[in-house]
């Protein structure tokens, strides 16, 4: 994997050789304003194997520890795909070393940990962003444009989302995402992150007033959540908005988002990872009515397709690198947009967990 | 409206000139084994107007009272689209007059009322069916076939459905479906009927073990439910199944059903009234996985299209008429299939209402 020469790119180090790091390594190479500069693992052999398997350029530095990545003055930003329980330790250290941060989701085990990370970023003037890719797809912007058109879409009343995947039996026993000492939040951290983010996104990042988990919580033998459902409520002057989320490691892959306004509706079924890289679609309808005698509908939802030259993960890296360039070249402050989105998402993760721990009692935010 | 001559058809009387009666009058004419024989209203003028507006054949008898319809020995079966609060009175009387019954949904204000109706049907040997049309579309049978293929679809883990429509402000103030003395169940009776039915259908009519309403209940000034959300749980030896339903008179039209199995998923967005009369589609996927590096999916859901010569409401009438023919011509007993489905649906409506009345406490069935 090697890109064209780029003028003065943001140089990324990757800390850890998780499977997802392969996708992000490619994204760093694809983004026009970033370059993959270093890869570090606890084992130099693992790092070398990663470099070979992903055909990294010979120029990429290979390190046998995370500290070497953080101590290399050539590294501008790091991508951290480590297990969630290790985030606070390594993300805080990275910020102290003045490395800008792309941190895999869930950002932390709880908001108290995330606040340590965000405070370290703030006090060290580094940019923070979590690794949610779908925010950066142009489809997301197009959907937001239509949702914001209150003339046609009306008030948003109901939001529904799923994030499900059916992994192998091996995953359910051994993957880090279901190990209590590594990713104690299980499906709530890994999968619900997207549903919560999508619900907040639809509501322009207004926090819900009440959060309640539903009683259908499935756990593995270690007590880690494999499947759960929750509901959020926004009580507003103009009426209520409700969101329902469902996340599960037990069901066939789904990434559904449906939004129901008073005048329109929107459906997408591949929100988190589009079916294809270069374009993504969604269904939009406004003003659909039944025909005379209710024999049918006056219109079917329209399928709107949004193309993209770069895949969403490269757009994510490009956005982070753009912000870092602003800080480095123009003396800008770090943007608060992405840290705030992450923090609100984590707050809702925490609230769902609290509701679960309280036996599905409502939690007010 | 007039059909070809039919040999010895089941003769329907319609009691009431509701808007939906126009669609069913047409369906009775379209079905090959039934004929529209009489129409009755509390006002003869209204009945005459209905006949003229719907171009009913001159042979159709026009009555100025429901009793005249019931007292006409030529009437084999009646369709009752009256407000729900009038169902028990007129449906019981119809059964006593030996008229087979097509009763609009919700079948009654509660299961105790429905039981009076069903007992009257049983003791008078008449067939009962509620007016849910979607059961009878061949798409429904095709979807059931795929859901039942556990090899490909796996275990059903999650079921999601909506029934929403955004009526005019006039509807929200004046329609019978939001009047406490006429249809006290509001959206829960009218719209959730479909979602509950679809959830039960997906689970082969097994009743859920627990039912809970979510706190987002919107009512009109008379206290009638305009919008609500609820969740059902089936606790089984092979794990849990959960359903979430959302019904609302406040949102743009939607009739979504999504079913998530361990190996497959199914989505339909026009369940209750297909977009078009002569064919209907749904999306089905099994074995969808992410491609290498999770850059996309190995397959998109497949759109499966199911054609039908007769619209679903005519198939509904045809099915009822077929059962009535069996009773009339072959001495069959009335089928228990449709009354049982209606009764289970009504039981779940009651349980959601009870949960709402208890402040969203879980209700065990």
Image: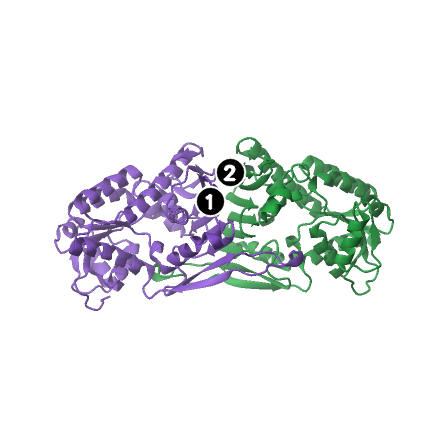
Chain colours: A green, B purple
Where does residue B147 sit, x and y in percent of width and height? Answer: 44, 53
Q: Nearer the viewer, residue A114 or B14?
A: A114
Q: Nearer the viewer, residue A78 or A178?
A: A178
- Give the class, few, some or many, for how many residues have Cα within 10 Å of label 1's Cα (few <14, many ≥20): many
Q: Quadrant of residue A316?
A: bottom right
Same chain check for tags 1 and 2: no
Q: Which residue is mark 2?
A: A214
Which mark, by number, is residue B244?
1
Q: Residue at x 23, y 57 (%)?
A: B321
Q: Is residue B122 depicted above or below B38 in this figure?
A: above
Q: Are marks 1 and 2 in contact (CB under 8 Å)?
A: yes
Q: CA distance from mark 1 to mark 2?
A: 10 Å
Q: Nearer the viewer, residue A57 or B275?
A: A57
Q: Residue furthest bottom?
A: B4
Q: Is residue B160 depicted above or below A28 in this figure?
A: above
Count up the numbered dots. Answer: 2
Mark 2 lies on a secondary structure that is loop
Q: Is residue A293 visible?
A: no
Where does residue A209 sit, x and y in percent of width and height? Answer: 56, 38
Q: Residue at x 40, y 54 (%)?
A: B144
| Tag 1 subunit | B
Q: Residue furthest top?
A: A358
Q: Residue at x 45, y 46 (%)?
A: B246
Mark 1 lies on a secondary structure that is strand
Q: Nearer the viewer, residue B227 or A213?
A: A213
Where does residue A312 sit, x and y in percent of width and height? Answer: 67, 57
């Amino acid at each position: 994997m090697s890109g064209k020469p780029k003028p003065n790119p943001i140089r990324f180090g990757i800390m850890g050789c998780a499977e997802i790091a392969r996708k992000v390594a490619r994204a760093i190479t694809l983004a026009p304003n970033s370059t993959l500069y270093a890869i570090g693992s606890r084992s130099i052999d693992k790092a070398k194997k990663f470099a070979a398997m992903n055909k990294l350029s010979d120029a990429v530095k290979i390190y046998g520890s995370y500290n070497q990545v953080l101590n290399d003055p050539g590294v501008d930003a790091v991508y951290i795909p480590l297990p969630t329980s290790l985030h606070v330790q390594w993300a805080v250290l990275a910020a102290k070393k003045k490395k800008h941060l792309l941190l895999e989701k869930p950002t932390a085990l709880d908001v108290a940990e995330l606040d340590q990370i965000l405070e370290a970023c703030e006090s060290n003037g580094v940019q923070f962003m979590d690794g949610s890719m779908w925010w950066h797809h142009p489809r997301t912007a197009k959907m937001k444009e239509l949702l914001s058109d209150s003339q046609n879409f009306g008030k948003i009343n109901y939001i529904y989302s799923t994030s499900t995947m059916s992994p192998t039996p091996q995953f359910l026993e051994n993957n880090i995402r279901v190990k209590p000492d590594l990713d104690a939040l299980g499906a709530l951290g890994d999968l619900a992150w997207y549903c919560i983010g999508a619900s907040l996104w639809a509501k322009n990042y207004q926090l819900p007033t009440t959060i309640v988990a539903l009683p259908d919580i499935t756990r593995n033998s270690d007590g880690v959540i494999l499947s759960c459902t929750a509901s959020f409520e926004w009580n507003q002057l103009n009426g209520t908005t409700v969101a329902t989320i469902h996340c599960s490691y037990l069901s066939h892959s789904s990434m559904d988002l449906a939004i129901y306004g008073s005048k329109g509706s929107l459906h997408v079924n591949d929100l988190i990872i589009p079916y294809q890289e270069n374009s993504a679609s969604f269904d939009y309808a406004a003003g659909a009515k039944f025909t005379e005698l209710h024999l049918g509908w006056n219109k079917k939802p329209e399928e709107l397709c949004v193309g993209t030259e770069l895949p969403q993960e490269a757009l994510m890296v490009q956005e982070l690198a753009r912000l870092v360039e602003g800080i480095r070249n123009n003396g800008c402050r770090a943007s608060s947009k992405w840290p705030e989105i992450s923090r609100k998402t984590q707050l809702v993760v925490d609230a769902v967990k609290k509701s679960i721990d309280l036996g599905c009692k409502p939690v007010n935010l």
